[in-house]
Image: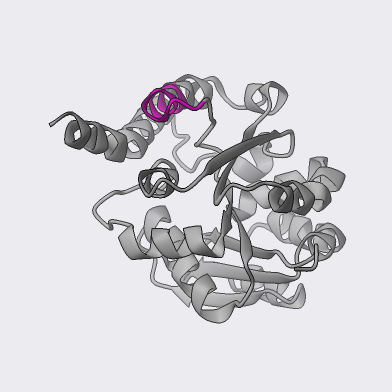
Amino acid sequence: MRISELTLVTIMHKPSHDPLFIRKIYESQETIEQSYLEKIAVISNVTDSQVEKSLMDLDFKVFKIEKKGVAHARRSALKIAIEVSENTHFHYCDLDRLLTWATYHPSELIALKESLFASNADYIIIGRTDYAFDTHPTSWKKTEQVANSVFSTFCNFDVDITAGSAGMSRDALQVINKHTNDSYSMTDAEWPLLVFQTDSLLGSIRVNGLRYDDNLNASCNRSSEIVEWESRINLMNSVLEVVFVANKTKTH
């Protein structure tokens, strides 16, 4: 397998026109082209047409789906990836996260494929260094620390599952597509847990590129600080639901 044989899989829902976001896509072109052989983007059917155009200008294969939430989009993206790509290794990354990575740490993103191919793991959880984690808002850090601690305790493996990025082999991708459960409203814990439960090998790396940029990564729920906290707590509970179910099954 050539070192360049890595497929990017990403999603985006962005109904409002955002000139900065569009500009960042074009500015990231060189870094993205050096990082991936193939690029697949799944966008909601109400995403701004300029986002679609910019991705197609960068030779992304763009697929539109109905807006049904982030978990539905992520699951759809993996199903599409296995159908349209013959590659053996994939990198899933939320598009806003990818653009932040390409903006602040482009050389790290370009070198990512070497780390993924060097690992024997079927699923590599791509988490954040202390530096990257600390750039996030307090409500994100406090709630994601809980989610990461619970998952790490269950799997006896210290990881950061809530950064929106993972590397996976074709075998792992097929396992996820076969067993993913639409009743869970988030996939951050579900995907690595599915691979873990098949006794396949989980791996982990931490990067600086998954840092936070308020212009690219901010939550939509920002009408007040309390609303932001409520949103992040609800998200944490959604992420951990699958772990709590798995723990009950294991102990009975």
| Residue 34, above or below 229 | below
- Which residue occupies 46% across, 59% down? 74
Tell me the quadrant of the picture where the C terminus can be found: top left
Residue 153 belongs to magenta span: yes
Task: Give the image quarter of residue 30.
Answer: bottom right
Q: Give the percent coordinates (x, y) of residue 16.
A: 55, 60
Residue 36 belongs to magenta span: no
Tell me the quadrant of the picture where the N terminus can be found: bottom right
Q: Give the percent coordinates (x, y) of residue 175.
A: 41, 60
State the residue in front, 121 or 63.
121
- Report the span colored magenta: 146-157
Q: How many numbered circles are shown?
A: 0
Task: Give the image quarter of residue 58.
Answer: bottom right
**Is the magenta region chiefly helix, strand or loop?**
helix
What is the residue that sits farthest to the bottom in this orientation?
84
Q: Give the percent coordinates (x, y) of residue 186.
A: 37, 47
Is 63 placed left or right of 103 in the picture? left
